[in-house]
Amino acid sequence: MILNNLSHLMENKANQMLRRALVNMGLPFAVPMVDEKREGIIDVEALLILTILLMKQDRIVTDLPAWIIRFKDLINHQKLKTIVKASPEKYKKTIVENLNQDPFAATPDAFKKIFDLQKVLTNTITETIQIRTSKLNSLENVARSSIMLKSRLLYGTGFRADLITITHIKNLTMNGKQLAHLLCSNSSTISRILNDLRASQFLNRDNERATPTNPYPGMFVSTQTIWNMYEMLDAEELQSDELRKATYENLTFKHDKFGKQIANLSL
């Protein structure tokens, strides 16, 4: 497992935080969920990829496909596809290998197509997934614990909903190119959405929310978490402590409180 590249302390911290974030999404782990208003917003697709990348042989292997089936209409498949495409080849291979386990054969075709999953669905898998699905939290409760999923219920699963979500972040620079990178969209799409939000007076001319809202401090898990995790996993393979330290010091954690907590254990 790729997670074994991390130190025992870092591995335990990553597992703990993954489960906390997954509770926000409705998975039934007996740990406190992330307080997004205090710790930061969770990007749905970034969390999915991060979970798959670091997945071990435990209950997540059945609970995650159950979640994907239950909430398939709230997943931005284009964002998932873009993250996977932009991933280094060795980590892309790890993600696909981790998904090629029997329970993921039950996931919807739109999801399986992204990863070219080949597993065949059986009655036993179906029964197992149905049992795990019944353990998931309700849509209403998930909408209260995940601002991104709540926005998607209001505005759909496209990038418009996610852009509206991150306008809640305090002192966020509303630069089209930077936002496109953060959301794994293209700049033209983000620019068009920003124009629409200004025209509707949701944003003012400075791309700030026209109506004040309770600010969120940043992002707990974002696409930046994925890129940082790849760098940290590479760094942990280095023999030189100096090079490993330099790698960590060059990482950017502006939108990644998850990765920052792991990196602090190595520095």
Image (cartoon, rainbow, N blue to C red):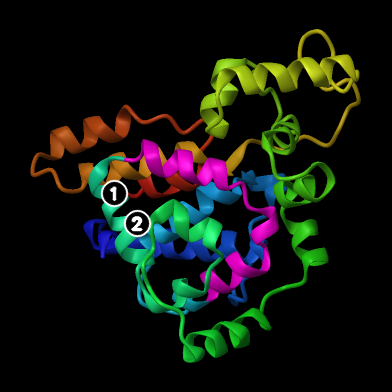
Q: Looking at the image, is 11 positioned above or below residue 170?
A: below
Rate crowding at label 1 as few (under 14), some (14 to 19) or many (20 or more) other CA atoms within 10 Å.
some
**In this rendering, is residue 28 above or below 47?**
below
Q: How many marks?
A: 2
Answer with the quarter of the image where residue 15 lies: bottom left
Q: Is residue 70 magenta?
A: yes
Looking at the rendering, in which quadrant would you find the C terminus? top left
Asked which quadrant contains residue 137, the reply is bottom right
Q: Secondary structure at mark 2?
A: helix
The image shows residue 212 at horizontal and vertical percentages of: 88, 27
Q: Amino acid at mark 2?
A: Ile
Does the residue at mark 1 contact the one at mark 2 (Cβ under 8 Å)? yes
In the image shown, does 220 or 51 lie closer to the viewer?
51
Magenta range: 63-87
The type of residue carrying mark 1 is Tyr
Tell me the tag on residue 173.
Answer: none
Kindly identify which numbered label has been placed on residue 95: 2
Mark 1 lies on residue: 91
Tell which of 130 and 36 is nearer to you: 130
